[in-house]
Amino acid sequence: MRCEMCTRRLGGREIAHGIRYGVSDPENDLFLPSKDSAYTVICQTCGESILRQIYSRLNKSTSTKYHL
Ligand SMILES: [Zn+2]
């Protein structure tokens, strides 16, 4: 299996990120993944890079939990 972002081959039991699409459930504050959504797998390095981009846009005072 390769990272679908940088195409690097993933090693055994290597930490990776899986992205799925689905719908939000605002009433229960949940994300409900669609049953026919396959995972888009990316390596930990790519995953952390994306998370950093996402959380760096948030207000610093609310993003300390996710500080990378
Ligand atoms: Zn990658």
Image (tube, rainbow, N blue to C red):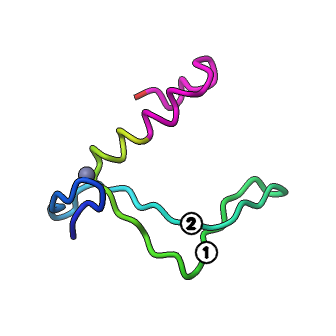
List x then y, in percent, for residue 67.
46, 26
Magenta stretch: includes residue 45: no
Residue sitting at x 62%, y 17%: 61
What label sits on residue 21 in the rendered view?
2
Amino acid on which disc 2 is placed: Tyr
Residue nearest the viewer, comparing 24 with 30: 24
Quadrant of image for the C terminus: top left
Quick one: label 2, few (<14), some, or many (20+) residues within 10 Å?
some
Give the alpha-carbon distance from disc 1 to disc 2, as whole Å.
6 Å
Residue sitting at x 53%, y 29%: 65
Q: Do the residues labelled 1 and 2 touch (CB within 8 Å)?
A: yes
- The picture quadrant where one finds residue 14 is bottom left
First-in-chain label (1 vs 2): 2
In the rendered structure, the answer to whether residue 58 lies left or right of residue 13 reads right
Judge whether 58 appears above or below 35 on screen.
above
Please state the extent of the stretch shown in magenta in the rendering: 51-67
- The picture quadrant where one finds residue 25 is bottom right
Judge whether 51 appears above or below 30 on screen.
above
Amino acid on which disc 1 is placed: Ser
Magenta stretch: includes residue 57: yes
Predominant SS of the magenta segment? helix
Q: Point out the residue furthest to the right here.
A: 27
Residue sitting at x 30%, y 55%: 5
Question: Is the C-beta of the residue carrying label 1 under 8 Å from the nearest atom of ligand 1?
Answer: no
What label sits on residue 34 in the rendered view?
1
